[in-house]
Image: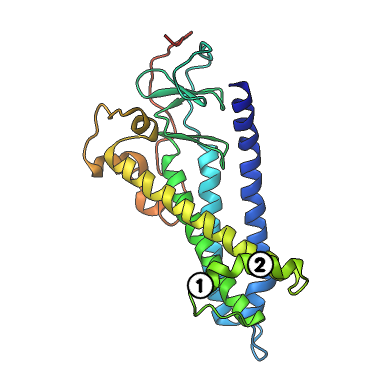
Amino acid sequence: MLFRMVKLRLLNTIAPAYFYTATMVTFALHFLLFMPTIFRSPDVVLNPTMLVHIAVFLFLMGNALGNYTMTIWYPSESAYETVIPVCSPDCPDRIDAHYLLNGRHFCKVCKKVILKRDHHCFFTGNCIGNRNMRYFIMFSIYTSCCCLYSLVIGVAYLTMEYSISFENPLTFLTLLPLSTGYFFLGLISGLQFFLVIMLYVWLGIGLVSAGFCCQQLLLVARGQTWCELQKGQLSESRGTWRTNLSDVFGSRWALGLFLPLQTVESVPGNWQVYHDHKCD
C-alpha cells in the first residue's frame, strides 16, 4: 500500500510537468516552425491567413491554460474540515480516497476532504469536485481542440517540408514505426523524427481529453460522479439534466464557454464537520 501511494504521489508531480512541457513545445513549434513555413509569403510581411491561424491557436491555447489554472485555483476542498480522518490498514475504500458522508471524500493524495469528489486529476495535481468540475470540463474540451488542431497543422508542415503524402490512411498508422527505423539508420533528421513523435503525442492527448470530456458531461447531466459510479451509487437528488448542468456550469455558462472566467459559486456551502472518522 505504501509503494502504491508513493507511485501516486510521484505521478502527481510528473503529470503537471509533462503537461507544461508539452504546452511549451507545442507553442514553440507553432510560432518558430509551422506558421512561418506553411503561411510564408515573399510579397506580404504579415499574411492575413497566418494571422487568422495564430488567433485561432492563441484562443484555443489560452482557454486550455486558463481553465487549467482555474481548476487548480478553485479546488473542491472543504474549508471547514481540517482534521485528517484515520483509516485502518484494511480500509475497504480505494487506495487514493476514502468515502466519508454526504458526498464527501477524503483524498489520500491531497490529504484534504473533498466535496462531491469525482476523481483525482494528476495533470492538475488536485481533486475534481463541486467547485472546479466546470473548469475541468472546459480544460478537456480546449486541450482536445488545441491538440487536434496542432495535429492538422503538423501534418500540413510535414507534407510541405518533407513531401510526405497522407492521402493513404495507412501512412499515418505506419509513420511512427517507419520513422523510428529511418532515424536509427540515419535516413531522417532528428527534427523530423521529433515532429513525428509530437504528432502522436497530440493525437493521444487530444483523444484522451475528448474522452474525459464526454464522460464528465454524461455524468454531470445524470447528476452523478465517477466515485458514485464506481461504487454503484446514485445521487440522492439527481434532478433534471438541465438543472444538473446549471449547477456545474453556473448562471453565466455561455460566457464560460469562450473565456476562462469564474462562472460557478466559489464559496462552498455549509457542510457538517465529521472528525476522527475511521473505517469500520
- Image position, residue 247 (x, y; %): 32, 38
Question: Is 213 left, or right, of 41 in this rendering?
Answer: left
User: Which residue lies at the image location 21% right of the left edge and 40% below the top edge?
Assistant: 240
Amino acid identity at mark 1:
Leu
User: Toward the viewer: 90 or 87?
Assistant: 90
Residue closest to the far bottom: 43
Camera sees residue 55: no
Label of residue 170 in the image: 1
Label of residue 150 in the image: none
Label of residue 195 in the image: 2
Question: Is 258 left, or right, of 162 in this rendering?
Answer: left
Q: Given contact means CB atoms under 8 Å apart, are the residues at marks 2 and 1 in contact?
A: no
Estimate the spatial distance between the alpha carbons at disc 2 and disc 1, rounded to whole Å. Answer: 18 Å
Camera sees residue 154: yes
User: Toward the viewer: 182 or 161?
Assistant: 182
- Image position, residue 93 (x, y; %): 44, 21
User: Toward the viewer: 130 or 189?
Assistant: 189
In the image, residue 43 above or below residue 91: below
User: Which residue lies at the image location 53% right of the left edge and 77% below the top edge?
Assistant: 166
User: Which residue lies at the image location 41% right of the left edge and 18% below the top edge?
Assistant: 100
